[in-house]
Image (cartoon, rainbow, N blue to C red):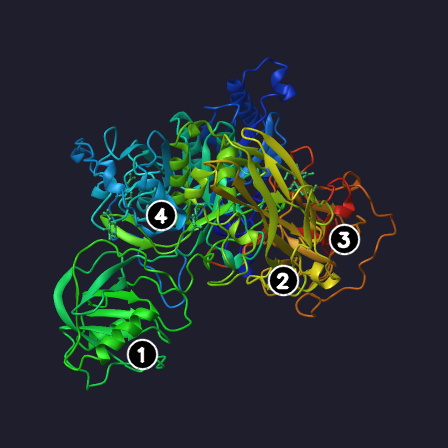
Amino acid sequence: MAHGSLASLLLLLAASAQGAAAFGGKSATGGRSVVPNSYILQVNASAPALTKRGVSVFEALDHTLAAVKQNGVKYTVRQRFDAIPEAFQAVSIQVEDGASMAELAQIPGVQRVWPVSLIPRPVEPTVSDFTPVSSSSSSTKSKRDTHTLEKRGTNFPPASAYLNDTFYPHVQTGIDVLHNKGILGQGVKIVVVDEGVDYTNPILGGCFGPGCQISFGYDFVGDNYTGTNAPVPDSDPFSSCSNHGTHTTGTVGALANEYGFSGAAPMATIGHYRVISCSGATTDEILVAALTRALQDNVNIVSMSLGSSVGWLDDSPVQIMASYLGSKGIHVVASVGNERNEGLFAADQPAASRIGTGVGGVDPTYLAAYYAYLIKRDPVPYISPTPFNLPNNYLLYFTSTNTSVTNDACNPLPSTTPNLANRVVVVQRGTCGFTVKQQNVAAAGGKIVLIYNSKGSGLIPQLDVGSTGLTAVGSLRYEDGLKLLSYYQSSPRGQSISFPNGPLAPYVSNTVSGGVVASYSNFGPTNELFIYPTLAAPGTDILSTVTGGVALMRGTSMAAPLVAGAYALLLSVGNNLKLSPEEARTILMSTSQPSPVAYGSETLDTVVSQGAGVINMTAAIAAHTVISPAQFNLNDTQYSNNTQTLTLRNNNRFPVSYQLSWVDSTGIVTYNDGATTDIIPSTTPNYVSTSVLRVAFSQRTVTVPGGQTVKVTAQFIPPNLTAQQRNQFPIYSGFVTITGQGQGAGAEQMEKYNLPFFGLGARMVDMPVLDTTNVALGPNLPFIAVGQNIQTGPTTFSESNPAVVYFRLAAGTRRLRVDLVDASTSYNATVPAVTNPASRLVKRSNTELTPRAAFPTLYSQVRTVGSLFAPSYWPPRDYLFNNGGTYSDYEIQLDGSFTFPNGTKGMAELGRSYKVLLRALKITADPTYTSSYESWLSPSFTFTA
Ligand SMILES: *[C@@H]1O[C@H](CO)[C@@H](O)[C@H](O)[C@H]1NC(C)=O
Ligand SMILES: *[C@@H]1O[C@H](CO)[C@@H](O)[C@H](O)[C@H]1NC(C)=O
Ligand SMILES: *[C@@H]1O[C@H](CO)[C@@H](O)[C@H](O)[C@H]1NC(C)=O
Ligand SMILES: *[C@@H]1O[C@H](CO)[C@@H](O)[C@H](O)[C@H]1NC(C)=O
Ligand SMILES: *[C@@H]1O[C@H](CO)[C@@H](O)[C@H](O)[C@H]1NC(C)=O
C-alpha cells in the first residue's frame, strides 16, 4: 500500500499535493513560516541515556546525532550550537522528506524540537496615501570588493560636536540633556543585529575595524541568503543593498554631521552583525548564532530590530538564547513589531522577554525639517530628509488658494496655470495619493513641490520625487501651509522662497500626533499576561544614515536602537556598567513618561500599547530611587495577583518623603463584540473606559532615610465588570505614581516615577483557541477536504490523492495535537464534527453512531493510533494580516502515514475506519485533563491506496 513509508505529514505548499492549496493561506504551518525538513534539536545532556555513559556535554550532541542516524533518519548538519553548552546546546539538521517532528522528539537525548523558523525581513509600515521608498536601496551590489578595503580609520569629531543637541528623537527622550553633559556612551560596547551596514557612509566613520566608528562585526549570511539556502558568512558586515541596518546603526552611532543629528551613543564601541541578506528572510538559527557571538564578543548591549510572532515568553531558541544573555548581564533590546492590526496579544520574539526590553514606537514630538527662507518673513520649516540645497529665490505658486478644496491637484492642472519652471508649487494633501499630485505638477512643468497637510489628517509623511521627474518635494505641516498661503496672498508682486543648505530646524512641533503611540506599533501582552511592550521611543519619520546618505524611516525598528543607545548612555555613567538588565530596565521604565491615547488628550494610552511609556533619559540619569518591581502584571480574574509589594530604596544621602498615588489609563478590549461572537481578536480593538476601581497602599506617604529601603503594599481593586464586558476580554491598566521630595538643605529636588500595571478582566482559560469561523478560509474551520470537497460524513480517502486537515489557532496554546484515532473513539469534542453542514459535495450521513463508551477524563486515557502533528513548542495565534500578506493556517496531509507514540513510523490500514482528533490546550488550563482542551473529532474515513 505504502508509497515510501516516510511520506511527509506536514504539508508545505511547495510540496503540496494537487488539491492541497484549495483553501490554502500563505503558510501551512500556522503562524510560523518554516524551512522545509529542517529542525533544531535541543540536546538534553543530562538525559539518563547519556549521563549513564558519563558523556560530556560536548559529546552529548554527537551521541544524539548518532541516535538520529540509528533511528533511520538521514540528515545533514546545518549548524551546531555547542559553543556555550549551558546556554543552549543544540544542533540544527536537514532531514529527508517524511521525517517528522514527533519522530525526532522521541529520539533519546533530544529534549525539544523546533522546526527551523523563518524570521521575516522587517517591513516599513505604510501610510494610506503613501508608500515609503526608503526601505530598499538603489544599489544592487552589496559585498564590498575586499581589495579596496581601506584601513585609514575614522576621523572622529570631538565630543564637543555633540553639545547643543537639538535632534528631535533626543529632545523627546531627554538624550539631548545627556549629550550636552558629554555623556555619549563612552566605554560601553553595543552591537546592532540587522541587515548589514554601509560603514563607507562618512557619517558612520567611512571604514570598518579597530580605529573605525564601526569597529567590530560579522556577516552571518552573505548576499544571497534567503533563509532556505546555505548562508555564506564572512567577517565583514558591510551591505549596500538595503537601508534598514544602516539606518538602525546610525540611530545608535551616527557621528556629528552637517545635518545636525547624531546617534544616541556615538562614542560607544559599536559593531554590526549582518543576519539578513539582500532579499528574503533569515532564520532563528542565524539569530541564535549572532546572539552567541555577542556573548563571545563581550558586548554590553544587543539591539535587534526584527522578530516574528511567538505570543509566549521563553518558548523559542532565540528567546532562550536572549534570556541567557540577559542572565549574563547583557541588555537585549528588540523592537515589538509593526503589526498593530493583528490586535491584542501579538507578541514577537525576541522582544517578548522577562529580562530584555521590547520597544514600541511613538510618533515624534518634533519633526525632521529644514528651514525655507522667505524675504522679509520668518523662515518656514519643510519636512525632508535633507535640505533641498536650492539657494536661489523661487516664486511661490498655490494650485488652489481655497483651503477647503479636498482634491487639490488630483487632476491635470488647468491650462491657465502659469509657467511653473521657476516656481515652488504648493499643494494640499487629500483625496488622491501624493504621487498623483506630484505627477500633475510635473506634467505642468513644475520642478519643486511642497505638499501641506490637510486639516484633521494624520502626520504627513516625508515625500520622495520617485520617478515623477521633479527636482525636489517636501511636506509641510498644515499650519505652515496656511502661513505660506497668507504670505502668497498678501504679496501681489509675488512671494519668493529659497532652500539653502543648513542643519535641521530645531523644535518643529508635531501638532498632529506628537508623542502618541504609532499607528503600526504592536499590542501586547504576552499569553502569560506579562507586560509587552516594555516601553516606547520615537519610531516614526526618524532621520538616520542609509546606504550612501541619510533618510527618514518609520517603524518600531527605528525605536529599538534609540533605546539601545539610551542604555549605553545610562551604563556609561559612574558604576552603572555593573547594572543588571533588570536593574537598568527598572530605571528606564520607572522614569518613562506615559503617552496619551491621542494628541492633546488627558487620558493615558493603555499599558498594552506603550508599556511604561516613552523613555526619559534625563530622569533616568537623575533617578536616585531604585524601585522594584518596575511593573505590576496583575494577571487575570482567575489567577489575579492584586496584592503587590513595592520596594523603594532611597539612594540619596538625605531622607526623601515619597507620596504614592495612581492614575488610570484607558481600557481596551480584545474582542469588540465579545469572544462568543468574535473568536478571533479584533484587528482594531475598541478603547473602553474600564478603569481599576482603586489602588490601596499600605502607606500613601513614607519617608525613607538616605540609603535605606522600605516596602509598601499596593492592593489593586479591579473594576466591576458585567458579563458582556468580561466576554470582551478587557485589559484595564494604569500607572502607580511616586513623587519623592528630598528633606533638608540642598535636597529640594523632586523625583517622579511611574510604574505601569495592567490586568485582564476575564479568565485566560476562557479565551477561544480553535478558530471555528469562516473568516480566513471561506468554509467554517476545522475541516478535512480533498481539493474543494469538504468532508461532511464517512468518506474514503485515497493515499495517492491525500485529504488535508485544515485548522487555525485563534489564540496561542501550550499543547497542540493532531492525532489519528480509531473511528470508535469516544471523545466529547468541543467543536461539532461537521462544521460545514452544507449539502454540497459529499452527502451528509446519518449513520454516524455516537459510541456509548464513557468519555475519558484524563488526557492520558485517550487512545490514539498515532500522531499527525505534535509540535514540542507552544504555537502562537495564527496571523490575520501576516505583515501585509494574509492569514496563516495549518494544513496537515492525510496520506495514511503517522508517527506511533513510541516515535516509529506507521501506515494506516486500508479499509479500517479512522477519525482525526484535533486538540489545543486552553491557555492556563491543566494539560492532564481532556476538558482542558478545545477539540474537534472529524467524521470517519477509511483509506484506499
Ligand atoms: C544651539 O543651537 C541652537 C539651534 O540650532 C542655536 O540657536 C544656538 O545658537 C546654539 N547654541 C550654541 C551655544 O551653539
Ligand atoms: C549571489 O548570486 C549572484 C546572482 O545569482 C551570483 O552572481 C553571485 O556569485 C552569488 N554570490 C555568492 C557569494 O554566492
Ligand atoms: C498568570 O497566571 C498564570 C497561571 O497561573 C501563569 O502561568 C502566568 O505566568 C501568570 N502571569 C504572570 C505575568 O505572572
Ligand atoms: C524628563 O524628565 C525631566 C526630569 O525629571 C523633566 O524635567 C522633563 O520634563 C521630562 N521630559 C519629558 C519629555 O517628559
Ligand atoms: C505576582 O507579582 C509579583 C511581582 O509583580 C511576582 O514576583 C510574583 O511572581 C507574582 N505571583 C504570581 C503567582 O504570579
Q: Give the CA separation, mark 1 to mark 4.
A: 36 Å
Q: Give the CA separation, mark 4 to mark 2.
A: 33 Å
- Residue 176: which quarter of the image? top left
Amino acid on which disc 4 is placed:
His
Secondary structure at badge 2 equals: loop
From this view, report whether residue 815 is shown above or below residue 440: above
Q: Which mark is residue 170?
A: 4
Q: Give the CA separation, mark 1 to mark 2.
A: 39 Å
Mark 4 or mark 2: name the one nearer the start of the chain.
Answer: 4
Q: Give the CA separation, mark 3 to mark 2.
A: 37 Å
Q: Return the residue at label 3.
A: 829
Q: Return the residue at label 2.
A: 689
Q: Return the residue at label 1.
A: 408
User: Does the Cβ of the disc 4 residue fall within 8 Å of ligand 4?
Assistant: no
Q: Give the CA separation, mark 3 to mark 4.
A: 56 Å
Depth check, front residue: 745 or 234: 745
From this view, report whether residue 736 is shown above or below residue 159: below
Measuring from the top left, give residue 318's x and y in whole percent: 50, 37
Mark 1 or mark 4: name the one nearer the start of the chain.
Answer: 4
- Residue 186: which quarter of the image? top left
Secondary structure at badge 3 equals: loop
Q: Residues within 10 Å of mark 3 (few under 14, many from 20)?
A: some
Mark 3 or mark 1: name the one nearer the start of the chain.
Answer: 1
Amino acid on which disc 3 is placed:
Ala
- Residue 275: which quarter of the image? top left
